[in-house]
Amino acid sequence: MTKPTHQQYHIDVPLTNLSVAYNPNGYIAAGVFPIVSVKEKTGKYFVYSKGDWLRREAKPRAPGSRAVRGGYSLSSGLYTCLESAFATPVTDEQVANSIQPLKP
């Protein structure tokens, strides 16, 4: 009997604390929206269209009149976390003969 695969025991659901949007030069989004940690190995996230951020459809309106209506498109993307590692072997002899501040 084989073990279930990741795709069999995990269903990708959208992240609720992340979305991807257009980031024009000079904007501070990278400083405001930090790298997000995730619990799941795979999942989905929302993506907003670049064109939706660059539209200028607002118009002046009279008091009590209805504002110009518009919308935006929304798609999704998939993420997969890949584990990476790097190691340097350290022997017991190196540990025993090391001094501070280099003592491993």
Image (cartoon, rainbow, N blue to C red):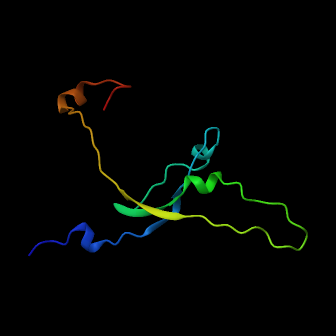
| Quadrant location of the C terminus in the rendered image | top left
Is 86 located above or below residue 98 in the figure? below
Q: Is residue 45 left or right of residue 40?
A: right
Q: Position of residue 24 (x, y in %)?
A: 60, 43
Of residue 71 and residue 21, the one placed in the foreground of this image is 71
Residue lying at 8% horizontally and 76% vertically, measured from the top left: 1
Of residue 7 and residue 61, the one placed in the foreground of this image is 61
The answer, for residue 40, to whether it is visible in the render is no
The picture quadrant where one finds residue 28 is: top right
Q: Position of residue 91 (x, y in %)?
A: 18, 31
Q: Position of residue 17 (x, y in %)?
A: 53, 62
The picture quadrant where one finds residue 6 is: bottom left
Residue lying at 37% horizontally and 69% vertically, measured from the top left: 12
Question: In the displayed image of the protein, which residue is found farthest to the left?
Answer: 1
The answer, for residue 101, to whether it is visible in the render is yes
Question: In the displayed image of the protein, which residue is found farthest to the right?
Answer: 63
Is 74 located above or below residue 95 in the figure? below
Residue lying at 61% horizontally and 57% vertically, measured from the top left: 52
Is 92 located above or below residue 2 in the figure? above
Of residue 15 and residue 99, the one placed in the foreground of this image is 15
